[in-house]
Amino acid sequence: MNYSDKSKLEFFGGEKISFLPTVIYIGIAMFLAFNYDFLSMKSVIVGGSAGILVGFLFAKDKEKYWEVIISGIMQPGNAKLLFTFVFMGCFTKLLSYGQIGQGFVWVSQTLNLSGGTVVLFIFLASMVISMGCGTPITAIYAIVPILYPPGIILGANPAVLLGAIISGIFLGDNISPSSQITATAASMQTNSVTGIPADPITVLADRIKYVVFAGLIAAILFYMKTNGAEAVQSNISIGKLSNPKGLLMLIPLGILLLVCVKTKNLLKGITLGILSGLVIGYASGLFGLTGIVNVQKGNISGILFEGVYSMVDVVIGMMMLFSMIQIMVRGEGIQKVSNWITKFKFVQSPIGAELVIGVSCIVSNILLSSIPLPAILLISSFINNLGHRANLHPSRRSYFLVGMMHNLSVVIPFSSVFVMSAMTMAQGLNQQYKFTNVKISGFDIFSNSYYLLAMTFIGLLWIFVGLGRKYQSDNKETLAEQVM
C-alpha cells in the first residue's frame, strides 16, 4: 500500500460522496442519543465503522480507499495524539488512586467551608484536577464521584454544584498546557504559505486573558449562589471522604504542567508526571504495588491497566474520526464546500469568516453530543481553509475554534454527554450515599454553568467587536515547535 500518495480519492457520485461516511456516523450518533439517551464515544465507533463500510461501496478504487483510511491514522500528529490519550488515561487513573479529590475534601473540611464557599471551592478544585486530565470528557468521570457527595453534605445546591464542576472542568482544560483539545486544534490550523501549524503554547498565551476573565465572572457568581442551602443530614462522616495525603498528587500534576510549558512536549510531561506520581503514591502509602498492577484469578487491575483500558473507546473513536476526515480531505469534499462558501464576499472578510466558523462550531458540537474533540476533528480542515481566505492568524483560529465549542453548546440538556453523564453519575451515587438522592434538572445545570455562559458572551465579542483578532503574517511566521 502506498500511504504517501496524495492524489484525489474518487467516488461514484463525485466529491460530495466523501461526506457520506461522516453523515452516516452523525445520523447514527443522533439516533442513539435521541432514541436511547445513549451519549458516548461508543457512538463514534458504531457510526464511524458503519459509515466507512458504506463509503467503501462508492469508492472507484477500493484499494486506494483503505490506503486513505490508514494514512489518516498514520499521520505523525494523529499517531502521537493517540498515544497521548493512552498515557493521559494512566495519569488520570493515577490521580484517582492517589486520592487527589479526597485531598481537596480535607481542605474544605479544614477551612470549614459551607454554602456558596463550597461551590466556589469545588469549582476551583475541578479546575485544578481537570488541568491534568487531558480532555473534559476524561475529567468529568474522574471528578463527579469524588467531589459531588462532599459538596452535597456541606450544603451546596445539587444543580449549581454540577454546573460548577462542569464549568471548572472546562476552565481547567482551557488553561492547561496538557489539553488535548488545544493541541489538536492548533495542529490542524496552519499558515497558508508555510504550512506550519499553530503553536499550542502560543495559543494558550493568546487566549489566557479571556479565559481568566470568564473564570473570574464564574467564580463570583458561584460564590454568590448560596441559595440558603444547609448541610444535609447523613450517616456518612465527611471525614471518611477526606485524606490530606491526597494533596501529594499535586506534585506530579505540577511536574506535568511545568514540563509541558518548558519543553512544549506533552508526552514527556505526561511520562514524568506518571513516573513521579507512582513513586510519590507508593512511598506515601496512598497505594501499594497492587494499586499499580494487580492480577487475581485471571483478572488484572491497577493504575497501568485501568488507565490504558479506560481510553480504549476514545482511541478507537479517534481512529474512526481521523479516517473519515482523511476521506473528506482526499475526496476533496471539504475543499469543494470551502470554495463554495468563500465565493460570498462577506465570508471572505474576518467577521464573516468568524461568524461562519462560530456557527459551524456550535452546530457540530451539538450534533456530536457536545464532545468538543470529535467536533474539532470533524470541522478543522474546513475552518483552516476558511481562515486562509480571510487571512486569520493560525493562533487566532485555534483559540477561536476551541472557545466557540467551550460555550453553552457543551451543556445543551437534550444532547450533552456532560449533562447526561453528570446526572447519571449523581443518580448512581445514591446507592452508596443516600443523601445524594435529589432530583436534578438538566436545564438547571445548563443555567448554572456560569463559565460556559461567560465564554459565550466573549465569543460574541470576538466575532462582532473583533476583540483580539490577529491576522496571518507570512513573513514573520516561524517554525512552530510541536507540543507532542
Image (cartoon, rainbow, N blue to C red):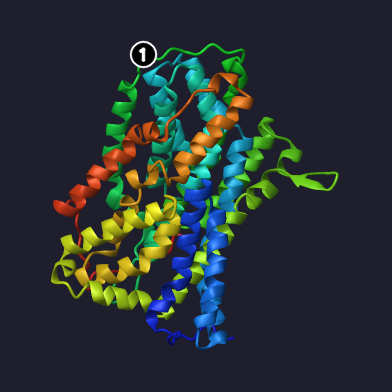
Looking at numbered disc 1 in the image, what kind of residue is underneath it?
Gly
Question: Which residue is disc 1 drawn over?
Answer: 228
Q: Spot the residue most to the front.
A: 35
Depth check: give the residue in front, 482 or 87.
87
In the rendered view, does 432 fall on the left or right side of 140? right
In the rendered view, does 291 fall on the left or right side of 273? right
Q: Position of residue 390 (x, y in %)?
A: 20, 68
Asked which quadrant contains residue 382, the reply is bottom left
Q: Residues within 10 Å of mark 1 (few under 14, many from 20)?
A: few
Q: Position of residue 388 (x, y in %)?
A: 25, 71
Asked which quadrant contains residue 50, the reply is bottom right
Q: Position of residue 321 (x, y in %)?
A: 49, 65
* Residue 137 appearing in the image: yes
Number of marks in picture = 1
Depth check: give the residue in front, 464 or 277.
464
Asked which quadrant contains residue 384, the reply is bottom left
Q: Residue at x 51, y 28 (%)?
A: 148
Q: Residue at x 30, y 52 (%)?
A: 404
Whether residue 159 is situated above or below residue 127 in the rendered picture = above
Q: Position of residue 378 (x, y in %)?
A: 41, 64
Depth check: give the residue in front, 121 or 431.
431
Q: Residue at x 21, y 58 (%)?
A: 355
Secondary structure state at the residue bearing disc 1: loop
* Residue 76 appearing in the image: no
In the picture, the quarter occupied by the N terminus is: bottom right
Whether residue 119 is situated above or below residue 168 in the rendered picture = above
